[in-house]
Amino acid sequence: MNKKIQLQDLGNKDYKSTWEYQEDLFKDIVDLKIRNRREELDLPTPNYLLFVEHPHVYTLGKSGDFENLLLNEKQLEAKGATFYKINRGGDITYHGPGQIVGYPILDLENFFTDIHKYLRLLEESIILTLAEYGLESGRSEGETGVWLGVGTPFARKICAMGVRASRWVTMHGFALNVNVDLGYFDNIIPCGIRGKGVTSLNVELGVEKVDEEEVKSKIVKHFTELFEAEFV
């Protein structure tokens, strides 16, 4: 079992090329697992955590409803945004500047074989990170992701999640709003959930800008503890 995770910060990178990169890493791990089984080998499978910030883009999960995108093609172009239908779970979400996107590409057989636990630990890494900024966040029953004000009329999502897994290998992941222009969420019904707001860390803290590198380091710290992993 290889509990080492290769950390890669891709900076600002186009969604499509990042998706293709994820697919390549994902396929390499799956192919190695198939080879191990076929040839009765025990070669260690690698794990990755990619950090990235995307230009304005809307993505729709495989079970999502296209009606939750409230813009047509020309309006998307006017906003400088792109749109992709992709192969993760979940509905529609937005990615853009000021948002920390994390893509863990893990062989869960190196850690545990439980997708439900995996999602809960992803959420917990964000919950613990936000707690370091004095924010109490949590889960909303039946709604994956991390929320503030759960159970109140002011419930608002700060981190969206959607994953894909095959042969216990994961891809896609989480998107934490840190210094995001929340106006872009007005063009969708986020995650297909009506009547609930979206927020960003800088808004909740009442500051113009939060240090994103600091936030990433806190996420990595909690990820390390929760997954009993080592980052390299």
Image (cartoon, grey):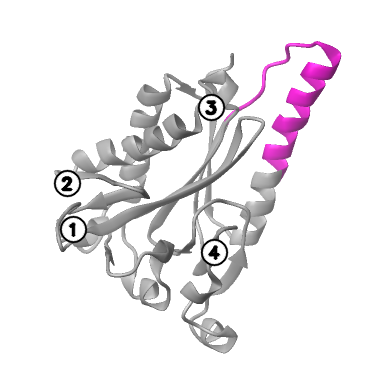
The image quadrant of residue 40 is top right
Q: Could you tell which of marks 2 and 3 lies nearer the N-terminus?
A: 3
The span from disc 4 to disc 3 (Cα, nearest Å) is 26 Å
Please determine whether, in this image, residue 46 is positioned above or below residue 151.
above
**Magenta stretch containing residue 44, yes or no?**
yes
Tag 2 residue: 135
Q: Residue at x 36, y 23 (%)?
A: 225
CB-based contact (under 8 Å), mark 4 and mark 2? no
- For marks 3 and 1 on the same chain, the one whose residue lies earlier in the sequence: 3
Marker disc for residue 59: 4
Q: In the drawing, does residue 13 fall left or right of residue 230?
A: right
Disc 2 marks a residue whose amino acid type is: Leu
Residue that badge 1 annotates = 204
Asked if the residue at tag 4 contacts the one at tag 1, i.e. Cβ–Cβ closer than 8 Å, the answer is no
| Extreme residue toward the front, this view | 142
Residue topped by disc 3: 5
Marks 1 and 2 close (CB-CB < 8 Å): yes
- x 16%, y 56%: residue: 205
First of labels 1, 4 by sequence position: 4
For the residues labelled 1 and 4, the Cα–Cα distance comes to 25 Å
The Cα–Cα distance between marks 3 and 1, rounded to whole angstroms, is 31 Å
Q: Residues within 10 Å of mark 4 (few under 14, many from 20)?
A: many
Quadrant for residue 74, please give it.
bottom right
Amino acid at circle 4:
Thr
Q: Amino acid at mark 1?
A: Glu
User: What are the residue bounds of the magenta stretch?
Assistant: 24-47
Q: Quadrant of the N terminus?
A: top right
N-terminal-most mark, 1 or 2 = 2
